[in-house]
């Protein structure tokens, strides 16, 4: 279906969104009694997240992916689960210990949620181990082996002994488990061996703990043409006699701990930087909320470790396989490109090239959007770098949420701008979980260069992605803005699908200036001209737009909502979507992760369809479109991009921005190209049913893939003259209904 440009086309679109009159005589199925007020209308947030991670793991079994990419999905699912336990499950444990009985939207107490989480997570962990065994065998057949000690040759043993003595032995500290030796501290995600030893000369017993150093790679690659690895724990066990001379091991086990890693921000925290420096240190010593032990560990050693770490039985997981599956990402090497996705080189917007590489000249011509990772993040970097070097630029304002722990080209450009005498302001968010330490470092680097660094609000997290460049042109100040759905992070921009809007719209420039003044001065801005912000009016605006679609449906005008996000949790918005469905609004949702809405319930949510796309790239951009009486897609539809998911935290506890898309070409790109392709996708799509279960669409080998479409078809708004000179990308027609 293409964009309708005239009345006849509009009527054609309307016809696809309105019931056939002949069918009106058939009574619609009634909704289950009382569901509109019952907690049963919501799915549990934590279980929905586990369902998402199950979909990630399923990709590890997808034979259409190259082997090492399948291993990457396994590693991601394991890392995701670790973070889930250290943050979400840790929070629930805290509520249980505090005696909290308040129920979630779906009617479960914290204790009930923990019970269901553990049941489902245990099944997930078992499936992860099964998947690892399968992939390990397939990789071995393909020439990449993870060896057991029994598979080593004498030459291998000699080389490993030298490696052990040079690179591992100096970092090991064996500790006896007796009253004179306190149980060693292990940080979050720390590994250790627990050993039962017997002295050969007199059979005297010794129990010892041997923490494994995090500074050493988990998998050691052996020399030679063949690609072979040995795990660190197996390496250490080979040479225990170097650590315990005269002893032999009669029992052993490997264990790994997960600690509470959430940081609660106290409202009275006066110095946020110092507060977070202390909080990061406390995180390493958070309560142990999950103890994982391998199945080989004897029962008495398991009791010893659990008692020393003060963990209860229900937090102990016995694993028949390897611990720390996230570390298997170390096995993904460049030596075997045949086992990886074919390399993809992102495009640079042709309109910027036509402007001689001058981004500001390209923006002045008209708005354009860059679709990452299909189009390079270099465009965003160049926007800031050119501003830093441009003598006509007088001011730069920038939000920084996640920018990476290594060299940041964005930070470097801001430093250069400040050193060149420009007015530079950076809003650095310290509450970006697990990036706090990196952000403190960047903030100090920026301050040393003369950048005005602020940390936003104590009680709000600044999640908006905004850049504002003010340039002197012909005696006037002209504002250029960048609004993103993703972070200013060059590495994640290679795998996250996000949108970057560049504009010189004066109204957007004024709005961006007001938003920055709010973030630096904390005084609420006046009514903005175009931007919608949280926590001020985002919730109200979304609810109002949904209610407008309900009014169109009741007036028998075409009514439709399309939305793409990472998570849908907020109960008020979900209830509004339920009301819209019952009024006849056609709702299409692309929700990658958590979805607490139950679609497809007859008479209640049967006009709502939910799909999740999981594939080579991580769907991260947020898009929302309202037909506004025209149906979708339509050139008069209201289309927005933004930084916020539809979660309570995004509406009420974060600074977010929602940006209207008004330029016709950009509007067509976002609605008719991007959203249409995502709705049309079959190759990577999972369909949610009313019970929260997801089913992968049965597909043929040549099934439509949105990711492949974006990789092979240039986007519209950044093409410039090429849009007229080269054959246009094929028009997309939805078949998702």
Image (cartoon, helix red, strand yellow):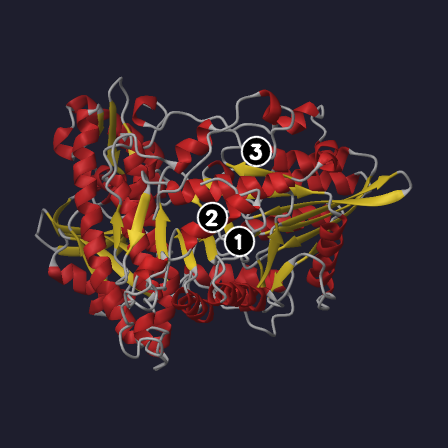
Which numbered disc, 3 or 1, marks the residue that appears first in the sequence?
A: 1
Q: Horizontally, is 625 left or right of 246 in the view?
A: right
Residue at 59% over, 73% down: 267
Number of residues whose C-alpha sits closer than 10 Å to that of mark 2, classed few (under 14), some (14–19) or many (20 or more): many
- Residue nearer the viewer, 7 or 53: 7
Number of residues whose C-alpha sits closer than 10 Å to that of mark 3, classed few (under 14), some (14–19) or many (20 or more): many
Q: Are marks 2 and 1 in contact (CB under 8 Å)?
A: yes
Residue position marked by numbered label 1 in the rendering:
630
Q: Can the viewer see residue 212 in this picture? A: no
- Residue nearer the viewer, 205 or 140: 140
Q: Horizontally, is 593 left or right of 445 in the view?
A: left
Number of residues whose C-alpha sits closer than 10 Å to that of mark 1, classed few (under 14), some (14–19) or many (20 or more): many
Give me the disc on residue 13.
2
Q: Are marks 3 and 1 in contact (CB under 8 Å)?
A: no
Label 2 and label 1: CA atoms lie apart by 8 Å
Residue 452 pos. (x, y %): 74, 53
Q: Horizontally, is 296 left or right of 322 in the view?
A: left
């Amino acid at each position: 279906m293409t964009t309708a440009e005239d009345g006849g086309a509009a009527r054609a679109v309307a016809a696809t969104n309105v019931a056939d009159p002949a069918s009106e005589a058939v009574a619609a199925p009634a909704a289950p009694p009382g569901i509109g007020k019952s907690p049963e209308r919501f799915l549990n947030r934590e279980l929905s997240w586990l369902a998402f991670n199950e979909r990630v793991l399923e990709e590890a079994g997808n034979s259409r992916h190259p082997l090492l990419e399948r291993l990457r999905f396994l590693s991601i699912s394991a890392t995701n689960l670790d973070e889930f336990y250290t943050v979400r499950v840790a929070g629930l444990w805290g509520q249980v210990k505090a005696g909290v009985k308040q129920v979630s939207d779906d009617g479960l107490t914290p204790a009930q949620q923990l019970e269901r989480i553990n049941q489902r997570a245990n099944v997930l962990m078992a499936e992860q181990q099964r998947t690892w065994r399968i992939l390990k065998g397939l990789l071995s057949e393909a020439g990449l082996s993870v060896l057991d000690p029994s598979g080593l040759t004498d030459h291998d043993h000699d080389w490993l002994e030298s490696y052990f003595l040079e690179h591992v032995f100096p970092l090991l500290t064996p500790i006896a488990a007796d009253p004179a030796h306190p149980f060693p501290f292990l940080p979050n995600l720390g590994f250790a061996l627990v050993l039962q030893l017997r002295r050969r000369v007199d059979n005297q017993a010794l129990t010892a703990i041997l923490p494994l150093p995090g500074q050493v790679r988990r998998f050691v690659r052996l020399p030679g043409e063949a690609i072979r690895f040995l795990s660190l724990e197996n390496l250490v066990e080979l040479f225990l006699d170097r650590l315990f001379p005269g002893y032999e091991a009669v029992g052993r086990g490997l264990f790994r701990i997960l600690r509470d890693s959430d940081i609660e921000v106290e409202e009275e925290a006066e110095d946020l930087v110092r507060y977070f420096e202390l909080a990061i240190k406390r995180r390493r010593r958070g309560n142990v909320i999950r103890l994982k032990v391998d199945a080989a560990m004897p029962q008495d050693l398991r009791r010893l470790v659990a008692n020393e770490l003060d963990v209860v039985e229900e937090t102990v997981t016995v694993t028949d396989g390897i611990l720390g599956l996230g570390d298997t990402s170390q096995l993904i090497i460049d030596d075997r490109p045949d086992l990886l996705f074919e390399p993809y080189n992102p495009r640079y917007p042709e309109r910027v090239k036509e402007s001689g590489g001058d981004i500001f000249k390209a923006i002045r011509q008209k708005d354009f959007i860059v679709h990452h990772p299909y189009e390079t993040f270099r465009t965003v970097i160049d926007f800031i770098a050119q501003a830093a070097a441009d003598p006509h630029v007088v001011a730069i304002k920038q939000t920084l949420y996640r920018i990476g722990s290594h060299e940041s080209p964005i930070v470097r450009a801001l430093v250069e701008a400040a050193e060149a005498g420009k007015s530079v302001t950076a809003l650095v968010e310290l509450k970006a979980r697990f990036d706090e330490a990196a952000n403190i470092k960047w903030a100090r680097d920026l301050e040393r260069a003369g950048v005005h660094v602020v940390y936003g609000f104590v009680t709000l997290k600044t999640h908006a992605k905004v850049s504002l460049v003010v340039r002197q042109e012909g005696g006037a100040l002209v504002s250029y803005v960048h609004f993103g759905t993703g972070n200013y992070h060059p590495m994640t921009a290679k795998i996250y699908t996000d949108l970057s809007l560049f504009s010189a719209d004066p109204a957007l420039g004024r709005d961006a200036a007001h938003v920055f003044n709010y973030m630096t001065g904390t005084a609420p801005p006046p009514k903005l001209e175009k931007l919608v912000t949280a926590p001020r009016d985002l919730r109200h605006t979304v609810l109002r737009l949904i209610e407008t679609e309900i009014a169109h449906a009741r007036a028998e005008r075409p009514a439709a909502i399309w939305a793409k996000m990472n998570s849908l949790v907020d109960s008020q918005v979900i209830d509004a979507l339920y009301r819209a469905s019952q009024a006849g609004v056609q709702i299409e949702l692309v929700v990658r992760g958590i979805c607490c809405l139950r679609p497809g319930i007859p008479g209640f949510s049967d006009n709502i369809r939910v799909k999740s796309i999981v594939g080579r790239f991580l769907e991260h951009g947020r898009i929302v479109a309202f037909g506004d009486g025209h149906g979708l897609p339509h050139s008069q539809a209201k289309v927005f991009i933004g930084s916020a998911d539809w979660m309570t935290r995004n509406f009420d506890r974060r600074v977010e921005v929602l940006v209207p898309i008004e330029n016709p070409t950009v509007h067509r790109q976002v609605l008719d190209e991007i959203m249409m392709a995502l709705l049309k996708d079959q190759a990577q799509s999972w369909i949610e049913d009313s019970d929260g279960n997801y089913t992968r669409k049965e597909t043929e080998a040549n099934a439509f893939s949105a990711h492949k479409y974006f990789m092979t078809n240039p986007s519209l708004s950044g093409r410039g003259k090429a849009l007229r000179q080269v054959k246009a990308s094929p028009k997309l027609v939805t078949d998702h209904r």
